[in-house]
Amino acid sequence: MKVALCQLHSPDTLAESVSVHVRAVERGAEAKCELALFPELSLTGYAMTDAESRTIDPASPSLDPLTAVSQANSIDIAVGAPLRAPGGGVEIGVVVFRPDGSRLRYAKQLLHADEEAVFVSGRSCLDLAVSSHTVAFGVCYETLQPAHGAAALEHGATLYSAMVAKHSTGMEEAHRYLSTFARSNRIPVLIVNAVGPCDGFECSGGSTGWDADGHCLGRLETEDKVLVVDV
């Protein structure tokens, strides 16, 4: 299965961001990808100061172009977005657009201490069947916590994906941890990071894929680009 790791800088407006996401998905579709992954909070950019005002309704018609490109190319698309939690508060969410027109959601379950004053934790996992794989989703900090990876494996994941917003030091740590996780557990692992200014720091790119032996399948530097990896 081919996966598009869509490394990008999030534009200022939702409409422009959706268009940028659609173009990235189209590049992945040209390479025959069946799944496109985007960074943490990719639709709005990672920000804690105004997360409340940035929340997105997964059913919003403004996101219809993502459903359209998913259906037109038979590709699953996982984007990052701040979501209103069912019990109140804001989640660091993932919205998955499926070729059948459905939209699924996942929310970051393990928050960094800095995020706990702004966001609430998600309560359920999302295991997505795509082609021959069962894809487990993780968002940034939680993907470096052993309990999260262990739960993914327990649920039968055959591909582990990390959607993140990290500076260069954080990405170095993530590369070390996730490559070891891939090799130790015999599972391909993907990480997709943002680029550019991000809530007081600079996201450094470095999106990467590893196979089940922990060998690198491809890596980006700091450019806005789509990396295609075959898992």
Image (spheres, rainbow, N blue to C red):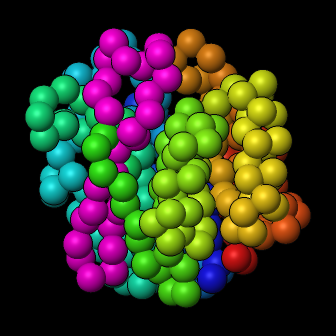
> Per the image, is 100 magenta?
yes
Q: For residue 22, say whether it is visible.
A: no
Q: Nearer the viewer, residue 115 or 43?
A: 115
Q: Position of residue 162 (x, y in %)?
A: 58, 50
For residue 227, above or below residue 162: below
Is residue 211 left or right of 69 when viewed as pictured? right
In the picture as drawn, the residue positioned furthest to the right comes out as 215
| Range of residues picked out in magenta | 95-121
In the picture as drawn, the residue positioned furthest to the left comes out as 87
Which residue corresponds to the image point at 63% horizontal and 82% vertical from the top-left? 1
Q: Position of residue 159 (x, y in %)?
A: 60, 68
Is residue 157 left or right of 78 when viewed as pictured? right
Which residue corresponds to the image point at 18% horizontal and 36% vertical from the top-left? 84
Which residue corresponds to the image point at 33% horizontal and 74% vertical from the top-left? 98
For residue 159, above or below residue 162: below
> Per the image, is 146 magenta?
no
Which residue corresponds to the image point at 28% horizontal and 44% vertical from the top-left? 123
Q: Position of residue 66 (x, y in %)?
A: 34, 64
Is residue 163 left or right of 60 when viewed as pictured? right
Q: Nearer the viewer, residue 134 or 148?
A: 148
For residue 189, above or below residue 193: below
How many numbered marks are there? 0
Picture quadrant where residue 45 is located: top left
Picture quadrant where residue 209 is located: bottom right
Q: For residue 175, say whether it is visible.
A: yes
Name the quadrant of the C terminus. bottom right
